[in-house]
Amino acid sequence: MDDNCIFCNIIKNKVPCTRVYEDDSFMAFVDINPAAPVHILVVPKRHVPMLSDPAAEDPELLGNLLLAVRKVVKQENLKDFRLIINNGAGAGQTVFHLHAHILGGIRMPEKLL
Ligand code: 5GP
Ligand code: ZN
């Protein structure tokens, strides 16, 4: 828990959110500034700043993050979606608590890859 981290405060129920999924280790909630009709953030409850941080070098954490994504998209009936993890300010990361963006509900306008 990092007291100055917005996602840690959401996880601790100190900041409100629209929660869509929760288990012992992960939480998913609607992005406050959605970039698509469906925009859900999946976050580990453990404070890990970003994917490249040494603290993220944990197969259980990373594997279970994708398993949590699978549960959320199944629950939300999302067949097609895009999954994004921004890593570092230069890549657009603004909240330094590891999170995966699930984007869906619209035909993705462009392909980067
Ligand atoms: P990043 O840019 O770090 O990959 O993504 C951070 C995301 O968190 C942004 O899409 C932003 O809209 C979202 N966000 C920032 N603060 C809050 C908040 O207080 N509540 C919610 N639900 N989302 C937030
Ligand atoms: Zn945090």
Image: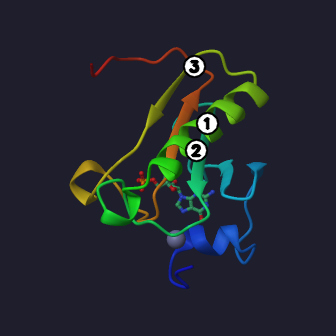
Percent across and percent down for residue 69 are 61, 36
* Kind of residue at disc 3: Ile
Residue 109 % position (x, y): 41, 17
Residue 76's place in the image compared with 9, above or below, is above
In what element is the residue under mark 2?
helix
Left or right: 10 as drawn, with respect to 90: right
Q: Are marks 2 and 3 in contact (CB under 8 Å)?
A: no
Secondary structure category for the residue under label 1:
helix
Q: Is residue 15 left or right of residue 109?
A: right
Q: Quadrant of residue 103?
A: top right
Whole-angstrom CA distance, mark 2 to mark 1, is: 5 Å
Picture quadrant of residue 16: bottom right
Q: State the CA–CA distance, disc 2 to disc 3.
A: 26 Å
- Mark number for residue 67? 1
Circles 2 and 1, Cβ within 8 Å, touching? The answer is: yes
Q: Earlier in the sequence, mark 1 or mark 3?
A: 1
In the displayed structure, 95 sits above or below 70; it is below
Q: Relative to residue 63, is residue 76 drawn left or right?
A: right
**Which dot, 1 or 3, sits closer to the camera?**
1
Residue linked to disc 3: 106
> 100 or 35: which is nearer to us?
100
Quadrant in which residue 72 is drawn: top right
* Residue in the image at 73% along x and 60% along y: 17
2 or 3: mark nearer the eye? 2
Are circles 1 and 3 on residues that touch, CB within 8 Å?
A: no
How packed mark 2 is, by other alpha carbons closer than 10 Å (few <14, some 14-19, many 20 or more), is: some
Marks 1 and 3, how far apart in space?
23 Å
Residue type pointed to by label 2: Asn
Q: Quadrant of the C terminus?
A: top left
Q: Residue at x 28, y 22 (%)?
A: 112
Tell me which colouring the rendered structure shows. Answer: rainbow
Q: Position of residue 65 (x, y in %)?
A: 55, 45
